[in-house]
Amino acid sequence: MNLRIRLERRMHQRWWYSLLAPTSAIVAALCVGAVFLAVKGFDPVAVYRALFEASFTSLYGITDSLSVATPLIMTGLAAGIAFRMNLFNIGAEGQLYAGAIAGSWAGIALGKNLPPVLAVTAVLVLSVLGGMLFALPVAAFKAYLGTNEIITSLMLTFVGLYLMRFLIYGSTSFWRDPAVTNFPQGKKIANAAWLPLFGSYRTGWGLVLVVLVAFAVWALVKYTKVGYDMSVVGSSPAAARYAGIPSKRVVLGALLLSGGLGGLAGGVEVASRAHALDPNGLALGLGFSGIVVAALARYHPLGIIVVAVFLGGLRNAGAALQSMPGQRVPAEVSLMLQGAILLFAIGAEIFVRYRLHLVRRPAVTK
Amino acid sequence: MNNSAFVLMLAASMVAATPIALAALGELLAERSGVLNLGVEGMMLIGAVVAFQTGTKTGNLWVALLVGSLAGAALSAVHAVLTITLRASQIVTGLSLTIFGTGLATFVGKSIEGMPLAVDFRPTPWGPLADLPVIGPVLFKQDPIVYATIVLGFVIAFYLRRTRTGLSLRSVGESPATADSMGIPVALFRYIHVLLGGLLAGAAGAYLVLGQVPSWSQESTTGGLGWIALALVVFASWQPVRLLLGAFLFGFSRQLNFFLQGQGVAVPAELLSMLPYLLTIIVLVVWGSRDLRRRVGAPDALGIAYVRDER
Amino acid sequence: MSDNVLPGTTPASSRGVALAARGVTKRFPGVLANADVDFELLQGEVHTLLGENGAGKSTLAAMLCGLYQPDEGQIYRSGKPIRLRSPREGLAHGIGMVHQHFRLIPRFTVAENVILGDPKQSLLMKPGEAERRVGEISERFGLPLDPRAVVSDLTVGQRQRVEIVKVLYRGADVLLLDEPTAVLTPQEAETLFATVRSMTSEGKAVVFISHKLGEVMAVSDRVTVMRAGRVTGEVATKDTSARNLAELMVGRPVEQTVRRGTGQTSATPYLEAHAVRLADAGRNVLDDVTLSVHGGEIVGIAGVAGNGQRELATTLAGITAPTSGSVRVGGVDIGGKGAKAARHAGLTFVPEDRLGTGLVPGLSLTDNMLLTRRRSFFVNRRAARAELAEAIERFEIKAPGTEAEARVLSGGNAQKVLLAREVSDAAKDGDVRALIVSSPTRGLDIGAAEFVRELLHQVRVDGGAVLVISEDLDEVRSLADRIVVLYRGQIVLSGASEELTVEQIGMAMAGVKE
């Protein structure tokens, strides 16, 4: 068969394509998920209804979803700001840990002597610095040596993970709570350093902060010289050179900013939810999921909020499902669905951006 | 002497190195064709859970290994279609693959969590050779997969260096445009090697439940080995034989802390676990310097979708 | 001894026709690249395709080797009609092309590059044998190469030899060399000519694509001259002269509106280069270039592509730092201080690569208007949008709107946006206004090209200094008050437009010294 698929970039995108793509991805993923559920003997409709109800119908469900979405928004922003420049910092995960380490240090060491506003600020500022510091090798090697940032940032993620585990499990460090001996835990940060929650709900000022940061990033990208220079460097290095924009400095700055945002994700987690450096609570995956959140939102800072809330709901529902009476559906259904939606969305995205042609090669004539 | 803790640790390092090496060899093939697949962890988990269930049902180790490998390959096919034909971002797709694979494997494996597997790969001593001091237990008293992996490493090295197809593969990873102009089917090469990568990642996962610890648990079965495999490919500068040595080193570092604990030496396990990743960064930065990059290092077209220039 | 037979001494009629094209036509969107072209290559001859850039030589060669298929007409191999659908099929017919841009894999050895994709290789490669055969071929045709050397370690000249060996290894006896000397030093070119002679002495036929008259006269037996997609003549080298070829190549100038300045120029030059030298990989890309452009005049840089024009433009625009020498805009030294310093001194620059360098394809048109402007911390798009809207109207730019991505623009409209940005900047009140424009009308239709030329003329009349760099000699002659010819990075000719004849300029462009 002499058929080939050719992709042609669409010059004009119809607005409804960008809604159709994620919608069809979700539908397709639910269908695939239904097959697996049915094979394992579950009723897909009941499971999906339970999923939806757990996350999106009650006020508690919604706020729980938002509390999961909060760090996802941050890591999504961290990935998004770099990816839109074709800088593939996939280490938001590690930068999150670094931010959590630095932020919890501030919360423990400085928190008790400071008034609440300053204490929280200290946690957040230090977490940003921690994330930046952790992204510094990635940024500097990329900008000045041309070292592949994908690999350095991925490797540093695990360095960060084990550093965090070392501080709690492997040593009697400053972060470890000396009072608990049977199972090592992080020392609680001072109450003053907590980001308050709304009443008895699990979400609070952390979410407000993160949304504000998203708007700030959006404004930075869209309305400032910094954002403009970043767009030019990311889109066309030759044009940057022509325009006299210092590419290396912009690359360095963008990766540090990305790292700082990743660090802030850790700071917010510590200040609003974990209240300690908690290797179990900061489960592996928020950083990586953030990358996919950013990709699905096409790296748009405000789109990232929407996608993160949706995926946050899905994640949250997973936890809620386990307590579902009678069915005992494992929480991992939501993770599987999340993965399937992502894969379908990636595929659908291509159809939005390109037109597919089947090309027949000229027939052989002798 | 052959029962000394150190020799036992060396022997155990061989076993620990095997799944890392298998998965990394697969990733090496995919990356040599220019496709980065960050879904190794997901493919390993799927391979493990499917192999475990097949093993339980059939009681046949080899069938379990085969089916587990095929499951890994099936997952990699998703990556291949999305990144090669549809030109989606290799990074985003690979990460999504890991998320999907982890979720699916955990869901499917929920019912078998903690169950023991009746069959497993056992060390087969090579007669008297197995009694040689030190090298006996390390080299001549391992299970068949350990040997198969070592052989595979050399076969892949030979394939890349000495065969026409291997040369074509390398050209596809270095410069698909040049390869295309020489009549080499770029997409076909990429598909085949991405699928081979998935097959080996699946096999690596299968080995984890069939050889090392014959039981399944999402938490501990892979424990991030897929990511170490990705690091190993870089650490080995995309060279298969160097990869085998690196795998031993990484496996050794995983065993070292058990050994040191036994010796009463307190080196925190977490710091040892960091080692492979730190070493990889150092290797990348040092060997990635401009002078050396001409010879060794990432395939030039790694991570880039190929579009034929059509007028 | 056949080795001693000089090229061209065998009567052409006694040899067979190795490769021929009859009535070949090839169209690309908006361009008639080849129109009813006839071409004939005899066994054992060196046949040059001569013509300026865009004359259609490379298109014809691409059809002869199987890269393109002709829309009309027929290719013949040894008298038999053939249809080539890919370069591989060309090679199967013994026709091989050596491209200007090498297709080599830097990390591979010479031998690996040569045998890559060869269907005749056994599955298990025998590196020793491949190396031996590569060595044999390179020795036989005077192409000194170490088969085991890694290509990234080789010089450009050596890499070209690898390309030639690659083609010979596949058994080609018709070789097409696309501007092979463009990247070579004179010494390397001499070695190449010796190789070409040794190939023809073994009965191989060579199509040599060039626009350098001197070497064409030296190396070829016959010459087919092309201009604007058509063949304008076919002559035996021994019956012609470089002057004659130059005339055939350049032809009679197309009637273009000749515009001249008012003759009133600024007292001091706005743009100056003094003894500028730029070295790249041990070669002087620019060599002792000294020139000046005053306000109120247009200076045109003529020359064949690849003789340092691009580097001259980026060096004068402050983007590339000269190895030695100085660049001044309005008396301020800006050499290598970056594009911003040059712009602050009063210089604007329209690069030849419009979409990708001059404009950012992924940004909106409004944002592109800001690319070379001073930007405050908050980007102010309002003024840019208004300016763009005005330009769209005044310049009749066809664009879907001010917020459309630049990538949707056609070449002509992209150039208009670029000029709107750079010229309006240049025309602002101030002492120094200098404008550098590379290939101002390349790829534009007649209407847009005329518009651009009128605009450049207007900048001059308004007192700006304009430097036009163009491979289109007619354009340079119709616009410029003074013409400077660049050859191998040196100024080989300069003078007032009126005082230089087409022939003089053509010879200078081709590197022929009188």
Image (tube, rainbow, N blue to C red):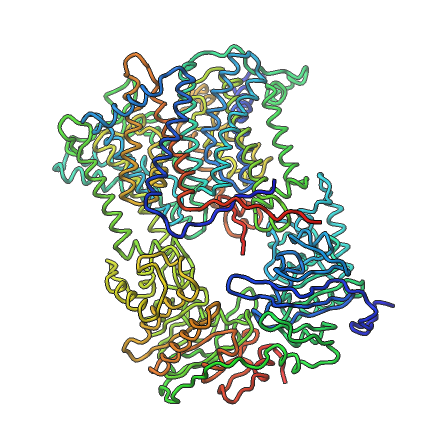
Q: Is residue A214 above or below residue C388?
A: above
Q: Nearer the viewer, residue C326 or A241?
A: A241
The x and y percentages for residue C345 are 33, 74
| Count of numbered circles on the image | 0
Whether residue A255 can be seen here: yes
The image quadrant where one finds the C terminus of chain B is bottom right
The x and y percentages for residue A104 are 24, 34
Q: Nearer the viewer, residue C183 or C32?
A: C32
Quarter of the figure with residue A177: top left
- Please name the residue shown 51% across and 84% down the image: C494
A361 horizontally vs A139: left or right: right
C185 horizontally vs A126: left or right: right
The x and y percentages for residue C106 are 59, 52
The image quadrant where one finds the N terminus of chain B is top right
The x and y percentages for residue C421 are 33, 68
Quarter of the figure with residue C366: bottom left
